[in-house]
Image (cartoon, rainbow, N blue to C red):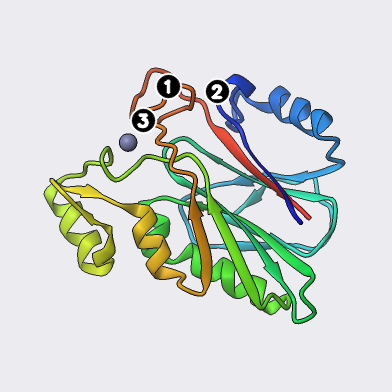
């Protein structure tokens, strides 16, 4: 079984500018010899990690079939999606870490990650979404609400609020998806971009 971890504020920030020492600390604590971070740009590029690189990769999804290689996504209110895929023999063959915000839902980054896992032989995929802003809290303006709900009707929540998890679940129905139901805006133990008091990032980590 893949190893999964979601951090909160108590583990410190992992943002690319100020979180470098926390990254080293995490790697040491979890005895991760290889950990891959992304330079996230709200795009839909998937990087398939097939050798251990210390370079910062510009992407919003990481996929690998390498063992002992941690894939890491950093978030504040966006959805950190971690996935694991079983091959035809029932053994775990591929994992993914995906950054899914509103833009990522619209540009289909999770779909691309699922396709990349399938290319590596994944037949049955499960996923878990860690702390993110919930459908009661994610209020947007009229134009954005209309745009997103026209494309993804399942995101429609009351009073111009978007349910990104519901949109994601509908977008990748082939993935058995679970929500940890932790709202970053409501729970002060997590970093929230919208709460704004601090600008840190927590991480989701997955390792085969
Ligand atoms: Zn909430």
The foreground one among 33 and 18 is 33
The x, y position of residue 192, in whole percent, is 41, 29
Residue on which the image places disc 2: 9
Residue on which the image places disc 1: 188
Query: Is residue 4 positioned above or below 192 on the image?
Result: below
Which badge, 3 or 2, comes first in the chain's sequence? 2
Query: Is residue 161 positioned above or below 186 on the image?
Result: below
* Circles 3, 2 touching at the beta carbon (< 8 Å): no
Which badge, 2 or 1, comes first in the chain's sequence? 2
Q: Is mark 2 on a helix, strand or loop?
A: helix
Residue beneath the point at 56% across and 28% down: 8
The foreground one among 126 and 31 is 126
Q: Is mark 3 within 8 Å of ligand 1?
A: yes
Q: Is mark 1 on a helix, strand or loop?
A: loop
Q: Residue 185 carries which label?
A: 3
* Circles 2, 1 touching at the beta carbon (< 8 Å): yes
Neighbour tally class for label 2: few under 14, some 14-19, many 20 plus, Cα within 10 Å: some
Residue beneath the point at 54% across and 70% down: 112
In the displayed structure image, the side of residue 29 where residue 158 appears, left or right: left
Q: Is mark 3 on a helix, strand or loop?
A: loop
């Amino acid at each position: 079984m893949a190893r999964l971890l979601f951090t909160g504020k108590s583990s410190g920030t992992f943002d690319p500018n100020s979180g470098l020492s926390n990254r080293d600390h995490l790697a040491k604590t979890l005895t991760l010899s290889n950990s891959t971070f992304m330079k996230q740009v709200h795009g839909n590029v998937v990087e398939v990690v097939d050798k251990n690189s210390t370079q910062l990769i510009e992407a919003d999804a990481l996929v690998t079939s390498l063992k002992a290689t941690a894939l890491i996504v950093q978030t504040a209110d966006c959805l950190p999606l971690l996935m694991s895929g079983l091959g035809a023999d029932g053994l775990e063959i591929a994992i993914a870490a995906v950054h899914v915000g509103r833009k990522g839902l619209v540009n289909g980054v999770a779909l691309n990650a699922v396709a990349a896992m399938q290319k590596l032989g994944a037949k049955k995929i499960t996923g878990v979404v860690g702390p993110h802003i919930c459908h009661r809290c994610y209020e947007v303006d009229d134009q954005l609400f209309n745009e997103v709900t026209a494309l993804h009707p399942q995101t429609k929540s009351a009073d111009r609020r978007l349910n990104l998890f519901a949109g994601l679940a509908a977008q990748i129905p082939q993935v058995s998806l679970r929500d940890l139901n932790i709202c970053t805006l409501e729970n002060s133990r997590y970093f929230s971009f919208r709460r704004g008091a601090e600008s840190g990032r927590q991480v989701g980590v997955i390792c085969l």
